[in-house]
Amino acid sequence: MKKRHRSFALLIGTGLFVAGFVAVAAASAPRVSFIRTATSTPASALNTRVSAPPLDIAAYNKKLLELGAVATSSPWYAAFLDDTVASTTSPRPRWPVKTVYPNAGAILPFNRVVAYYGNFYSKGMGALGQYPTDVMLQKLASASAQWAAADPSTPVIPAIHYIVVTAQEAPQADGMYRLRMPDSQIDKALELAAQIHGLVFLDFQVGLSTLQKELPQYEKYLAMQNVHLGIDPEFSMKTGAKPGTVIGSFDAADINYAANYLAGLVRANDLTPKILVVHRFTQDMVTHYKQITPLPEVQIVMDMDGWGSQAKKIGTYTNVVAAEPVQFTGFKIFYKNDTLPPSEGIFAPAQVLKLTPQPIYIQYQ
């Protein structure tokens, strides 16, 4: 097993098995408020279909080339724009990935998503539970403002990334080592997203259960226009080991199931494309990556989820996520664990933007 980048702890009093910790963000961060008045968009509006113009294919391709750092002088740049990649004899770069075009209204790559991650019951699982609501939203606003300043050409959309099924140290009554969150907690996530005009991601740590069993439990939420999906291979325990003792995995078949499940909801409810975030920090967490199939209805992000020194995180991103291209990439920043010795401190947006490809989804824990 490869060296783990995350730490585990049992939160006494709630029974939630948690991964990672957070600390107060830098006081020097710019302060931009997303907190709205009583006239804010209601959470019910998250289920409203937004009319979208047809996809601008040229703009889409150019943005992918920009994320992939492909020079305009490269023969491959023109081939990508002209859809003549197959006949191009020049060496093919790993990025960008040439795959299916999304349906109208796709969020990526025209926008960058900046998400705060966690569970409202737990101070140890991430920023969502670490701070009082108003403080958390202010910190998310500050982080989003930093990203907007670092890359003015890519608008930022804030997001609440909520762990809706949490891996457990104890087996529970059904022996599945996972706990499902009640609707009231998801409704809270929806209300917060409405306040900031942002997105909601529901994240699944399935334990000894499966995506096939867990996703349908939350279909009424996943069928909403502004609700997207995250899945965590680390806590998918296919060997029967309990969560936290070994790193779990998802196969391409699992990821394709999740994508097809979302695609069915998109078609049935006339929605714009969903985003599917897959956490990853080792090779073995995702198997048969070449068989993962992006769809017009679903945009797939492989999110570098490891913590540690900057050099270790760059190495993990380069050798695990960027080396096995699927469609888009993400990058996770830990407010506390990324500062543990011998760390040089957490990444600033400008540093992350030097990665190839540039991550289009950013998560803070």
Image (cartoon, rainbow, N blue to C red):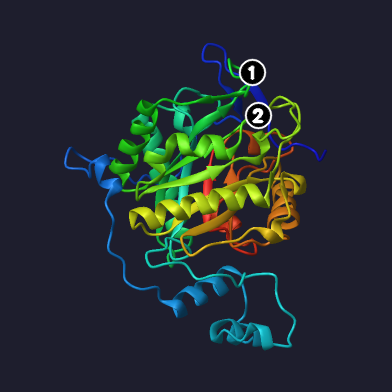
Residue 26 seen in the current view: no
- Quarter of the image where one finds residue 294: bottom right
Question: x and y percent of residue 42 in the render?
Answer: 23, 41
- Residue for badge 2: 208
Mark 1 vs mark 2, CA separation in Å: 9 Å
Instruction: Find out whether the residues at labels 1 and 2 contact each other: C-beta distance under 8 Å.
Output: yes
Q: Nearer the viewer, residue 39 or 16?
A: 16
- Residue at image x 45%, y 44%? 29
Report if residue 128 is visible in the image: yes
Earlier sequence position, callout 1 versus callout 2: 1
Classify 271 as above or below 254: below
Disc number placed over residue 171 in the picture, else none = 1
Indicate the amino acid at tag 1: Pro
- Helix, strand or loop at disc 1? loop
Disc 2 marks which amino acid?
Answer: Leu
Residue 281: quadrant of the picture = top right
Q: Residue at x 65, y 29 (%)?
A: 208
- In percent of width and height, residue 142 lies at 41, 45
- The quadrant the N terminus occupies is top right
Q: Nearer the viewer, residue 22 or 248?
A: 248
Residue 269 percent coordinates (x, y) = 34, 53
Question: Can you say whether 310 is above or below 248 in the image?
Answer: below
Q: Position of residue 279 (x, y in %)?
A: 62, 45
SS at mark 2? loop
Q: Quadrant of the C terminus?
A: top right
How packed is label 1: few (under 14 Cα within 10 Å), some, or many (20 or more)?
A: some
